[in-house]
Image (cartoon, coloured by chain):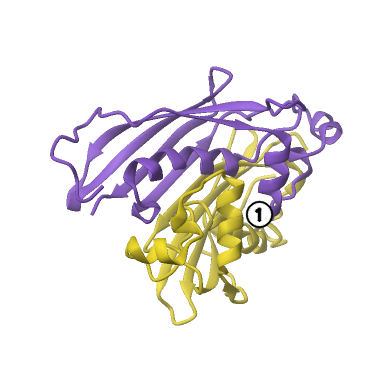
Amino acid sequence: MTGRPADLEVGSELPEQVSRVTRADLIRYAGASGDFNVIHWNERVAREVGLPGVIAHGMLTAGLAVRAVTAWAGDPGAVVDYQVRFSRPVVVPDDEDGAEVTVRGRVAALLDDGRVRVDLTVTSGGEKVLSLARAVVALR
Amino acid sequence: MTLDAGLVGRSYPPSAVYEVGREKLAEFAAALGDRDPVYRDPAAARAAGHPDVIAPPTFAIVLSLGAGNVVVEDPDVGIDYSRVVHGEQRFTHHRPIRAGDRLVATASVAAVRSMAGNDMLTTRVDLATEAGEPVCTTTSMLVARGGA
C-alpha cells in the first residue's frame, strides 16, 4: 500500500484472519520469546493455579492479531503503535487442532500525516480474548 | 499489600547491550506463523526501504520482559510474581527494530494503582541504540491478584 488510499474510510474492514494455535506453537513461541512461564506448557501446573488448562501466551495472541494489520498495510514497519488489553485466556487443548483465534479489523479513525487507527476484534471459541487491540499504521 | 505511589517515576540502570540478530528475528516471526520476507530476507527488507530485516511489531517484548524484571524484583516494589498476570501491553515504535541494532533498555515505573484488592503496576521500558537513538517504548501493565 503506498500512501493512504483515497477510498479508505472509517468503517473499512480488513480481511478476516483465522489462525490455529496448538501446544507445539506454544512451545515454539516460548523458545522464541524467552517466556517459559509453566502455565503455557504444563497442564498440571496450569490447573493447580486455577486455569482451565494450558493457555496461550497473551503476547502470542497479540502477535497473531497484529499480523492481520501488517498483512493489510503491506509493510510491518508501518505499525507505529500497538496496544492490547488481555481479558480472557486462550485455552489450548492437547490435540492436533488446538485453539482457533479469529481476528477482525476495521478502520476506526483517519489521523494526521496519513496515519490510520485500526481496531481489532480478537476472539477464540466465540469469546473476546482481547478487550482492546488497537494499532496505528503510518501508510506512506 | 498496596504499592507505594512514591515509586512512580523511579528509573533503573540501563541494561547490557542486546544485539539484534537476523536469525532471532526470523525465529520470532516463525513462532507467530508469519512468512513475510521482510523479517528474514535482507534483499526483500531493502526493497521495502529498510536497511536490514526488521522485527515484527511485538518483538520488543523479548527485551522489555527482561528489562521489566528489574522493577518486579525491586524489594521496594514488593510484588508477588507468582500472583502476576499480564494485563495490558503497548508498543510505541519510533522506527522498526532491525537486525544489527545494538539496543539498551531502560526501565522505569510509570504508574501504580490498587483496585478491588489487586495491585496494578505499569512499567515502561525505553529501547534506544547505544548511541542514544530512541527506537521503541513499551509499557506493560501487570496485575498482582490479591488474596495473599
- Can you say whether B74 is above or below A85 in the image? below
Residue farthest left in this picture: A6
Label 1, secondary structure: give it.
Answer: helix
Q: Could you tell whether A129 is left or right of A47 in the image?
A: left
**Palette colour of chain A:** purple
Where's residue B72, x and y in %?
Answer: 67, 56
Q: Can you identify the residue that label 1 sits on? A: A32
Residue farthest front in this picture: B43
Residue B96 occupies quadrant: bottom left
Residue B13 occupies quadrant: bottom right
Give me the residue at 13% from left, 39% from top: A6
Any part of residue B11 in sight: no
Q: Could you tell whether A23 is left or right of B15 in the image?
A: right
Where's residue B132, x and y in %?
Answer: 43, 78
Where's residue A51, x and y in %?
Answer: 75, 28
Any part of residue A41 in sight: yes
Q: Please tell me which residue lies in front, B21 or A35.
A: B21
Q: Please tell me which residue lies in front, A86 or B73.
A: A86
Residue farthest top in this picture: A126
Residue farthest bottom in this picture: B131
**Palette colour of chain B:** yellow
Badge 1 amino acid: Ala
Where's residue A74, x and y in %?
Answer: 34, 47
Quadrant of the rendering where the C terminus of chain B is positioned: top right
Give me the residue at 28% from left, 34% from top: A107
- Can you say whether B21 is above or below A130 in the image? below
**Mark 1 packing: few (<14 Cα in 10 Å), some, or many (20+)?**
many
Give me the residue at 40% from left, 61% from top: B44
Give me the residue at 49% from left, 73% from top: B101
- Which subunit holds the residue at mark 1? A
Quadrant of the rendering where the N terminus of chain B is positioned: top right
